[in-house]
Image: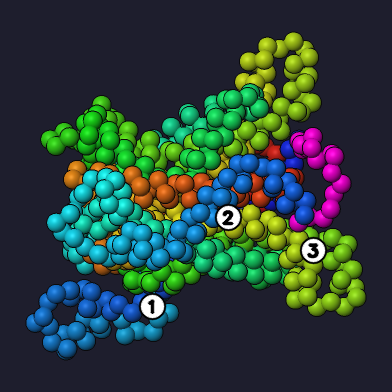
Amino acid sequence: MGRFIVRRLIQAIPTLFGVLVLTFLLTRLSPADPVSLMLGGQYDVTPEDREQLRQTLGLNDPLPVQFAIWMWKVLQLDFGNSFYYHRPVIQMIAERIPNSLQISIAALIVTVAVGVPLGVIAALKRGTAADHAIRIFSVSGHAIPTFWFGLIFVLVLGVQLRWFPIGSMNVVGVDCVFCWDRIWHLIGPVAIISIGGIANLPRILRTEVLEVISQDYVRTARSKGLREGAVVARHVLRNALIPVVTIFGGLLTIFLSGALVIEQVFNWPGLGRLTFEAAINKDYPLVQAGVVFSAVLLIFSYVLRDITYAFVDPRIKVR
Amino acid sequence: MATQATTVGPVIVAPAEDRRPAAGLWSDALWRLRHDPTTIAALGILLLMVVLALGADVLADNFFQWSFSKQDILSSYERPNLSDPAMWLGSDQLGRSQIVRLLYGGRVSLFIGVFGAATSLLIGITLGVTAGYFRGWWDDLVVWLVTTLNSIPTLFLLLIVGLLFRLAPLPLAIFLGALGWLGICNLARGQTISLREREYVLAARTVGARPARVMFRHIFPNILPLMIILAMTDIGGLILTESALSYLGFGIQPPVPSWGNMLTGATQFLTKGPWLVYAPGALIWLTVLCLYLVGDGLRDALDPRLRGAVGAKR
């Protein structure tokens, strides 16, 4: 098992390298000049000063050299200073990641808590009204533009009915993590982000349960007189849930990308909103860092998924 | 990414199917499609949307008599009413007709979806088939590229692009397509890997067919049905991405209306014109839903064995 984990971590290195190359190239090959971005609206800058700034920033070096230097710094978690806030980028990212994780983890729990029962019901009650209802819900949940659903949530439940706050993480003056106030603020964004996953999970789980239910050992369990509930809980579900682990990595993609817009809709100070505002301010060290960190979170979740998968299913061969 | 369509559930054959002798893939598919009311309805709605989008100019000039950019400050925030066709869905903060802008927005969304999907099909199939056929270092490179792009949440990547460029609809469509080919590539690659071991591919190679011919004449036609199905979900996914990106202000730029950027305006004045929020999102939802339903219907029609195999893509 230890060897598997190490090997899987090593496999992540080329991917991470690719992410860095892509992020670097996209920002550096752009028509925008970093020096003018950095100097923004300052007019009293002589061309000599500009040239000196170029030299200090290393912008006159060949591209591969620039990349090597940038990557070396990034590996030491040095993304430079924000052009806009003039603070170390890494600090700002570190402040925001816990906020984003709160939404993602809560959304994961909600997705599993709602999605798994729906999938099992759809499979066990195959062909009934419940199955059709779940399928309709599943397809329409898959197609819904989540940010728009979030807007409707804010408009109807926030602005018009005033049941929920219309944004941010806490009521002004309150600052806590594990308290009712925070949960009250989390309900909106988490519910909206979870929809994608809740729509996805039953479709996959239904197929899996149907597959497992026709296995010999399920027939054996039934024929030895086990109650249906016990058959489902002990024999069907435990095997059907194994492949569900694989979609968790995909779920986090949905959450991270979804979070970018949902954080905007709900005014939630997370990684997505930080990156978005940085993009508006043309603060590109911050954008670079935001993209790299979202990718790192994702790669890490893929690794975690594979390890969990190998852990719950001993049949998986270490490749 | 194990999205290969290998696991086959219990095949449920519709009773009517027994009464009809098989008559080739496409005519069989058409026959099944005609007996699938959900798909027909979804196709109908989509066709209606395409017609409305294409006829937006004619409708705006002759019926609504209100161009999409015509402003009228005096009648801003007009509630939806039936007195004037242009005000059926009310007007926005600049007094522009919501319904006319929705027509043009639909044109933009469908345009992006179709052209983006065409781009991603082109890239995905080319890379997937060649990687699966040649294997070796080329395959490794493609897989690496797919894994890398898969590791960056799409919207984050698009933010960088939005930071640097303000793209017109066609370049934006191509760009979205150029980032959205991963699922297609994975499936095309997986299918090719299994197809290249078939006897007919071996036969073609034996008589001296070159790789390009084998891939184009023998493998491509066999993955085509699967790719058509994927194209539908792809168009839907692209419309969703475009709307989110435009909502954030990095996609389609005003004054060109798109369903996404209409929502940006609506949010800024949420309390003054709440009706402006409903229609654009509902139309995105309806369009994407119909595309997914048509995708599902086509999947069942073209290849009943694939039931449930494609949905796991996203």
Q: CA distance from mark 1 to mark 3?
A: 39 Å
Chain letter for the residue marked with disc 3 in the picture = B
Please name whichever residue, B107 or B156, is drawn nearer the observer in this view of the structure: B107
Estimate how packed mark 2 is, as few (under 14), some (14 to 19) or many (20 or more) residues with alpha carbons within 10 Å.
many
Chain letter for the residue marked with disc 2 in the picture = B
- Asked which quadrant contains residue A125, the reply is top right
In x, y percent, where is residue A196? Answer: 46, 42
Residue that badge 2 annotates: B232
In the image, is residue B229 above or below residue A44?
A: above
Q: Secondary structure at mark 1?
A: loop
Amino acid carrying mark 3 in the image: Arg
In x, y percent, where is residue B185? Answer: 62, 62
Discs 1/3, front:
3
Dot label at residue A29? 1
**Which residue range is magenta in the image?**
B11-26
In x, y percent, where is residue B163? Answer: 32, 68
Amino acid carrying mark 1 in the image: Leu
In the image, is residue B9 above or below residue B33?
A: above
Residue in view at x 41 percent, y 69 percent: B169
Please name whichever residue, A155 or B282, is drawn nearer the observer in this view of the structure: B282
